[in-house]
Image (spheres, rainbow, N blue to C red):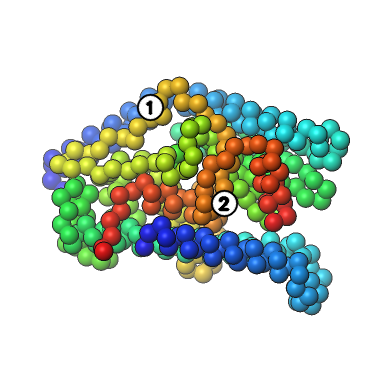
């Protein structure tokens, strides 16, 4: 999992959005039959919003994988830096089941130069949103901001560029 | 966790708190609102021809923002009406990773970002860097922007490219068209 993964999600997302826009203008079934009586602009906006949420979700799964792979790498390869040492203490109890928020993000916050309140806070907020998406959206989430694909992609791109995340060859 | 580790933890938290307390948050807010006003003036100027002929209506509306350390404060959004379509320049805040401020352009079928960044920056990726400490010495906080940094509003191109481009008339027209009609 790396930047190429989210790059592919973004390219796929852009293709789907472009297709929806094209389809909404040219498809006879879209224009006449299927959504008869509904403003086309509304239908298109709803479709794009749904696509947006799905793409945001997949970006977050890629980001979670990157952090978890880094955690496992640092534990199994016995890296000497403070972050890796702290991860190995967690690994003794939790092994592969470390919590992304409580263990992995918290350790990054304590053992790296990542600006805790802002960067780690943004990550936590984003993963609360992922939790909401992954569990069927059956409650009204209390989120500090409005999340969308563009935000999630930007966050993931910045994080994958900024953090020295390690991965197996 | 032994006593030594806990001591280090307490020390880190105190250092973080003193860093936060030393920031002039009121000044940060004023500076951000001033930059926001300059952005809106620039947009109004680039759209002047259409506004003066009545083809486009521009309106500033009050909004409330709430940011950590700064608290709740009043700002303005800029609403642009072109025929039946509206797009809004919505201020997001000044405590934004890697930048000094962010405004989202929101239209019926799309969104775009405008960031207040170091005028020399060409990509968001160059603005944040995280390091890991060795030998129980926590790495220092991320470096602050050097004094004399020239801040400039720039459009962020859509993912996956995410490049900073200048707010020229041509780029603004393109952006408005994208979020308004796809």
| Residue A41 visible, this angle | yes
Chain of the residue where label 2 is placed in the rendered structure? B
Chain of the residue where label 1 is placed in the rendered structure? B
Q: Nearer the viewer, residue A149 or B158?
A: B158
A111 to the left or right of B48: left
User: What residue lies at 83% left-to-right and 48% top-to-bottom?
Assistant: B83
Q: Position of residue B45 (x, y in %)?
A: 73, 30
In this view, the mark in front (2 or 1): 2
Name the residue that disc number 1 marks: B21
User: Is the N terminus of chain A in the top left, top right, bottom left or bottom right quadrant?
Assistant: bottom left
Q: Position of residue B178 (x, y in %)?
A: 68, 52
Going from N to C along the chain, the mark reached first, 2 or 1, is: 1
Structural distance between the alpha carbons of marks 2 and 1: 36 Å
Q: Which mark is residue B113?
A: none
Q: Nearer the viewer, residue B118 or B39?
A: B118
Name the residue that disc number 2 marks: B158
Looking at this view, name the residue that lies furthest to the right: B53
B6 to the left or right of A47: left
Q: Nearer the viewer, residue B73 or A104?
A: A104
User: Is the C terminus of chain A in the top left, top right, bottom left or bottom right quadrant?
Assistant: bottom left
Q: Position of residue B91 (x, y in %)?
A: 60, 39
User: Eyeballing the image, is A100 above or below A31?
Assistant: above
Look at the numbered discs 2 and 1 and tell me whether their residues touch, using CB distance below 8 Å.
Answer: no
User: What residue lies at 72% left-to-right and 41% top-to-bottom?
Assistant: B79
User: Eyeballing the image, is B64 above or below A79?
Assistant: above
User: What residue lies at 27% left-to-right and 50% top-to-bottom?
Assistant: A107
State the SS at label 1.
Answer: helix
| Residue A139 visible, this angle | no
Q: Position of residue A137 (x, y in %)?
A: 53, 66
Other residues around mark 1 within 10 Å, as few (<14) / some (14–19) / many (≥20): few
User: What residue lies at 56% left-to-right and 63% top-to-bottom?
Assistant: A13
């Amino acid at each position: 999992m790396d930047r190429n993964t989210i790059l592919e999600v973004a390219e796929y997302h852009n293709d789907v959005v472009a297709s929806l826009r094209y389809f909404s203008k040219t498809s006879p079934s879209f224009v006449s039959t299927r959504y008869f009586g509904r403003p086309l602009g509304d239908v298109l906006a709803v479709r794009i919003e749904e696509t947006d949420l799905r793409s945001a979700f997949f970006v977050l799964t890629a980001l979670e994988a990157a952090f978890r792979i880094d955690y496992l790498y640092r534990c199994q390869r016995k890296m000497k830096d403070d972050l890796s040492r702290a991860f190995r203490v967690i690994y003794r109890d939790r092994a592969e089941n470390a919590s992304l928020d409580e263990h992995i993000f918290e350790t990054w916050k304590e053992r790296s130069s990542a600006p805790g309140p802002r960067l780690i806070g943004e990550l936590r907020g984003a993963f609360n949103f992922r939790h909401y998406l992954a569990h069927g959206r059956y409650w009204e989430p209390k989120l500090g901001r409005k999340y969308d694909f563009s935000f999630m992609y930007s966050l993931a791109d910045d994080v994958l560029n900024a953090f020295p995340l390690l991965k197996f060859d | 966790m032994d006593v030594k580790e806990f001591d280090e933890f307490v020390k880190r938290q105190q250092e973080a708190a003193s860093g936060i307390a030393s920031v002039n948050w009121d000044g940060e807010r004023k500076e951000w609102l001033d930059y926001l006003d300059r952005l809106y003036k620039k947009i109004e100027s680039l759209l002047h021809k259409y506004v003066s002929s009545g083809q486009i209506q521009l309106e500033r509306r009050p909004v409330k923002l709430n940011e950590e350390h700064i608290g709740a404060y009043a700002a303005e959004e800029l609403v642009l009406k072109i025929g039946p379509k509206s797009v809004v320049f919505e201020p997001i805040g000044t405590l934004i990773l890697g930048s000094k401020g962010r405004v989202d352009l929101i239209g019926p079928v799309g969104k775009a970002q405008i960031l207040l960044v170091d005028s020399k920056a060409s990509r968001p990726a160059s603005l944040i860097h995280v390091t890991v400490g060795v030998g129980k010495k926590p790495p220092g906080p991320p470096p602050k922007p050097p004094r004399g940094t020239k801040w400039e509003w720039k459009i962020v191109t859509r993912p996956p490219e995410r490049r900073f481009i200048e707010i020229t008339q041509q780029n603004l027209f393109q952006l408005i068209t994208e979020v308004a009609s796809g």
